[in-house]
Amino acid sequence: MGYQHEQAIAILRRTPATLTALLSGLPEVWTLSTEGPNTWSAYDIVGHLLNGEETDWIERARIILEDGETRPFASFDRTAMFENYKGHSLTQLLVAFEQARTKNLATLSASDITPDKLTSAGVHPALGVVTLRQLLATWVVHDLNHIGQIVEVMARQYADAVGPWRAYLAILTRPILTE
Amino acid sequence: MGYQHEQAIAILRRTPATLTALLSGLPEVWTLSTEGPNTWSAYDIVGHLLNGEETDWIERARIILEDGETRPFASFDRTAMFENYKGHSLTQLLVAFEQARTKNLATLSASDITPDKLTSAGVHPALGVVTLRQLLATWVVHDLNHIGQIVEVMARQYADAVGPWRAYLAILTRPILTE
């Protein structure tokens, strides 16, 4: 299916409430556990989403609309949340994410994204020329990817507890999701 | 991490609200699209979860507690939702799932699941002897697995729309989640 702006926004608008419904008030044994060294907990992933919201997505959209291909995007630091939000509770991160997402969608709405603007392009530091349409589609998939990563890391805490059912649960055995 | 009953219930209790936050009111292009023949849409997956709630999980727990290994579980029909809920809207399925889950957790709570009862066993038609602890752990992972499957099938509707970012989004390229 092709990118449709209002359909994309419908997903972006729902992510904060989805994360809150899934994670708010959960025992920390679920939210702080990882899948092993160099993998992320649900808490880490929410921090990563917040960091993208504060520094990356809307800023790249702005660069495309204002500077086009004349000014490449800054690189996005995928692990900045480990320093930036040290000491923050999961609840604080969830609230901050909801607020940042709401603000960013308001900014996007104010930009009046026409079909013409969707074809505007910018330069990604590693991927080269990308369009606003591709950026916004990626924002959507990035949300879904990280919701998938959260349920995966939580599910794997019970990889042994399920006993023989393990054979039926692909989420426990296939290669893990990363960024 | 080992199975802890209250921690497991904390996940099971959150799934209906998570699915509602993610899916309620979304355009059908997201909720009815599959990943191709013989794969499930978000709508199909919610129906599968509802069907498990109405016919499988709590019934198997009851068999373990009342009959133990003397009476094997019935097979669970993974695709019964296609017939059972024909014509139901997604909203109807989400509401019915929330109600069925609430009822089942009340039944479980009334069963006073002690550590002793968790070691009780039953007979799965394909997997053989399984304990109540393994059944309940699987119920949790099954929820998380299907939330993961829902975000995956939705993400893949934008597999082309993301353009070169596809290389960074494992959710678009790895083997798909099934049951």
Image (tube, coloured by chain):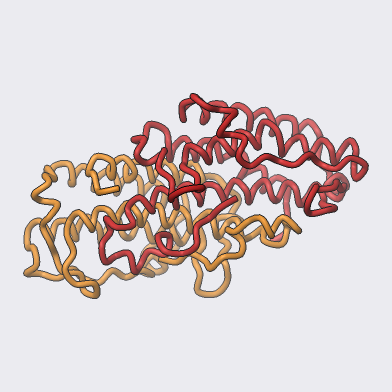
Chain colours: A red, B orange
* Residue B56 appears left or right of B123: right
Identify which residue, B93 or B107, lies in the foreground.
B107
The answer to which image quadrant residue B103 occupies is top left
Is residue B60 left or right of A28 when viewed as pictured? left
Q: Residue furthest front?
A: A37
Between A165 and B80, which is closer to the camera in this rendering? A165
Residue A164 lies, in percent from the top left, at 26, 66
Q: Position of residue B150 (x, y in %)?
A: 50, 56
- Of the pair B68 and A84, the residue shown nearer to us: A84
- Locate the C terminus of chain B by quadrant: bottom left
Q: Relative to residue A166, is residue A179 depicted above or below?
A: above
Near-viewer residue (A37 or A105):
A37
Q: How many marks?
A: 0
Q: In terms of image quadrants, where is residue A50? A: top right
x and y, in percent, of residue A74 in the image: 78, 39
Q: Residue at x 27, y 55 (%)?
A: A161
Q: Is residue A10 left or right of residue A159?
A: right
